[in-house]
Image (cartoon, rainbow, N blue to C red):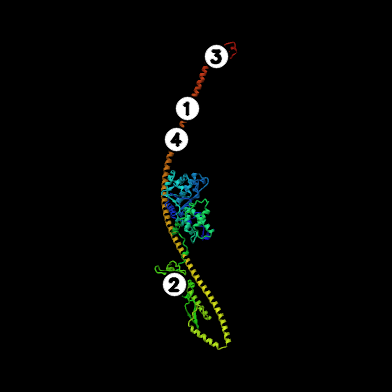
Amino acid sequence: MYEAFYGFKEKPFSMLPDPGFLYLSKKHQAALTLLEYGLLNHVGFCVISGEAGAGKTTILRALLERVADDVTVGLITNTHQSFGGLLDWVLSAFDLHKPNLSHVEMHQVFMEYLIEEYANNRTVLLIVDEAQNMKADALEELRMLSNVNSEKDQLMQVVLAGQPALKETLRKPDLMQFAQRIAVDYHLEALNVIETCGYIQHRLMTAGAEHDVFTPAACERIHCYSGGTPRLINLLCETVLVYGFADQREMIDVDLVDEMVQERMKDSVVPIVNRDAAKNDNKEAAKALEKDFPWIKTDGDDQTQIPVTDMEAEGVQKTESIADKEGLSTEEGKEKTEKVPVEPEAEAASKTEVKADGNTGKAVVAGAGGAASKPVPASMATEEAAIRKPFVKYGVLAVILVLALVGTALFFSNADVPSKIIEKNGSTDRAVSEKIVNKKTLSKKAASEKADREAALEQQKKREQEEARVKRLQVEAEALKKERDAAIAKAEEEKQAKQRAEKKAAEAAALAAKKAEKERIAEKKKNARLAKKRAAKIRAEEERVRREREKLAEERRLMDARLKEENRLKQEAEARKLEREWREEERRKEQQAARARAEQQAIVEAQAQAKAREPKNRSSECSGPTARFKANCR
């Protein structure tokens, strides 16, 4: 909405974290450097903390753009337990998540992935943003995941970023082991007033601003309201730019900032640090800030620098001397030139003051207003003089032509022009006039008067024609002068554009060279790291093969011993089993024989008892009157 009004290519104060707008204050530069140091040295854990809006996420985005190609990055931005377990998020960050896996299976999948990446000479980097939401058990689980090491190499590196509550969690006694493994720990503080001004100006220039938009006092007031928090600075600057666009203000001053805060932020939930900053206005501090304020340098700052050389200065002086001449007097076909005074305004407009700096060898040109420009190198002046020289030449010729035409017109008009034509040899002209009058007096008075009237009319007509012609020539001369000035201005603009293009090309070349050198160093480090990893991998492979061989031999020996022992135990068990069965069978047979003998003995005893009782019983039963009816008694 306001981008076109202020000349921005994009919004300078977007709330989204954009590494392209990264302002590296001393604090942010230290944080980014420590993170890069941790990655290059393969440390286990790095922790970056700071208040909300301090720039932690932007630092992480910038780090992602600087990591090497052999680093596999996984990013976790949501660590709340209500959205799932930590291992689920870790697998999703590396695109390894599969449905219906148990916790043990997920752990095994991730371990295999780490080993595979290490075999491919790649480093695994896990970045956890908003880590203050992680509980102690989740942090401990993360520590256990990072326990996979290969001799001197760390298979996984972890970067944690969060608010100060993260450090409070890490200070708990049950996370002492985790805290001891943190090699990089940095806390992002808020920006001070100088850094706040630099932050605002940096984002404006990155967005394409070609002139200053905020006054130093306005930047100082924004720092008071925001407390130096980048996110609040963005919010306040974005809102005040909308206010400035609504009021059509090209400069945002402190009054507009106060008005915005009082109206827009009065009942807002935005955490303004000091809502009464306007009442405690410190004008002296704002004035002192102007000395260190990072002003935006524009091309207009160098427009007064007009490089000239000695040759061009001579041409300018020649132009001045010719421009001071405005008339020519002629007699009988012979042209005579003489200086004629001109008006001060024209003289001031045509003069160009040239000054040479004898100490530095640089030329300086001042305009009609007397404002001297800054020194310009002589090498630039030589090239500029080559552009100006043809225009100066054509301007001189045009002025000479105009003055000649003006003199001719005035000669034929035979009339006096005050302060423009000064007649010489006046006595000769008067003598000629007297002769003409004497000759005319010899003719008739009527013819003389008629001729005089006709001559006067003719002269009046010619005078009017010549005046019109002179005016037309003056207009043409002014047009030529304007064209010359426009051509010079265009040449200067082209020169400045060329200089800017060369400067940009030089800067681009320097950046390209710096980038190439950085890439070369990174490639060298990468090759060294790859060679080290390959050597370590070979050693690890040899050690693994040796251990596997020893392990296989030991397993084979143990297996043989175990088989022998199992066979012996099996045979002993079978023998004991057969012996038990035989004994059981013998005992069973003995029991059966004993039972048979007991039964036989019982039968015999029963029969003997029966026989012993039989006579007695018979004698008692066969007595009485009914004995003859019993079978036993018959």
Coordinates of residue 109 in the picture (x, y in percent): 48, 47
State the mark number for residue 617: 3
Q: Return the residue at label 1.
A: 587
* Cβ atoms under marks 1 and 3 closer than 8 Å: no
Q: CA distance from mark 1 to mark 3?
A: 43 Å
Element type where label 1 sits in the image:
helix
N-terminal of the pair, mark 4 or mark 2, is 2
- Secondary structure under the numbered disc 2 in the rendered image: helix
Amino acid type of the residue tagged 4 in the rendering: Gln
Q: Is residue 603 depicted above or below 458 in this figure? A: above
Q: In the depicted view, which residue is nearer to us: 224 or 486?
A: 224
Disc 1 packing (10 Å; few <14; some 14–19; many ≥20): few
Q: Earlier in the sequence, mark 1 or mark 2?
A: 2
What kind of element bears circle 4? helix
- Residue 94 coordinates in the image, percent (x, y): 49, 50
The CA distance from mark 4 to mark 2 is: 124 Å
- Indicate which disc residue 571 carries: 4
Which residue in the structure is indicated by mark 2?
313
- As helix, strand or loop, the secondary structure at mark 3 comes to helix
Observer-side mark, 4 or 2, equals: 2
**Amino acid type, callout 3:** Asn
Q: Is residue 398 above or below residue 571?
A: below
